[in-house]
Amino acid sequence: MDEKGSEGTPAMELLQLTYFCDAAVTQNFSHTAKRFCVPPSNISQSIKRLEGELGAELFDRVGNRVQLNSRGEAFFREVEQALTLLRHASDTARGAAQDGTLRLGIRVSRRIAMQAMAAFQSRYPSVGIVAEHGDHAQSSDFDLILSDASFSPPDFIKIKTFREPILLAARRDSVPDKPRLSAQDIMDKPFITMSPNYSMHKLTLEVCRDMGFEPRIALQGEDPVYVRRCVMLGLGVALMPTVSWRGQFSDEVGLYRLGDYTRDVCIYRRASAYPGGYMAEFLHMLVEEFEREFGQI
């Protein structure tokens, strides 16, 4: 038996209604699924449950196509107004600006995140973005977090994971001229890496130790631009995430494979944050940007 409220009304869920409203606009469950980064079956099943709770079909289904019917149109008008009020109430309670504010924790892949931010703000200039780099702030400060798999924030939902190869960046005149380097080729080289509170520092230690030696870390910094600049100046070598740092070195720097080393880049959404509106728009654009970049591997 379906759960009912105290007045006998259906026990509809907020996410269920959010999916419905988006599908009412797109008239395509697959497009709505892509927007919210979930399988199309999630959308179909959610709307089926909603129709069961209401005791009325909201979409006409013909083959693989769906179309909002008259009952669905009437329901959509009312629900859209209700969700708008809820969004406003949520923003007010959180102290967000009236036009909305996104709070981003960017621990990895800064370049790709910035590209998504630029595209989003060109389309929605009234929505503010507050972004913080590094591993210093508390997870609860953010709506969305970009991290590698070594950091899994509590009370966050993992939306998408991308795997990128890890290569060695070095001036071409400092290492043997071959695409794959051995431990003997690099074990005496000074290493440049991020500071110990960044995941790339830990990854550098793990890769070198897996190859059988302890790296001699000569320089470390808080900014990846500093790390890359030091490599270009010939001050040492550095492990680099292939996609995130793509196109950031001069021609004097070569990229070399050490083995089949990779890292996972994860996109997380705060579980208690409202999943629609400007957050859904940015999340969709962020995932698209990552898919475009990682599709070039």
Image: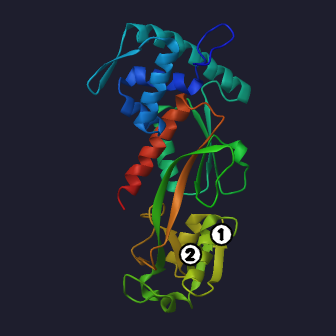
Residue farthest toward the left in the current orientation of the protein: 63
Q: Position of residue 37 (x, y in %)?
A: 47, 40
Q: Amino acid at mark 2?
A: Cys
Identify whether 4 is placed above or below 28: above
198 relative to 21, above or below: below
Q: Residues within 10 Å of mark 1 (few under 14, many from 20)?
A: some
Q: Quadrant of residue 143?
A: top right
Residue where numbered disc 2 is placed: 230
The secondary structure type at the circle numbered 1 is strand
> In this picture, is 180 found above or below 67?
below
Which residue shows up at 37% across the image and 25% down it? 26
Q: Residues within 10 Å of mark 2 (few under 14, many from 20)?
A: many
In x, y percent, where is residue 133? 63, 54
The answer to whether residue 121 is seen in the rendering is no
Left or right: residue 230 compared with residue 258: right
Q: Name the residue at 48% across, 44% down.
A: 286
For residue 185, which numbered disc appears in the image?
A: none
Camera-side residue of 267 and 233: 267
Instruction: Give x and y (percent) for residue 247.
Output: 42, 64
Which amino acid type corresponds to the residue marked 1 in the rendered image?
Answer: Gly
- 1 or 2: mark nearer the eye: 1
Does the image show residue 55? yes
Residue 221's tag is 1
Callout 1 touching callout 2 (CB < 8 Å): yes
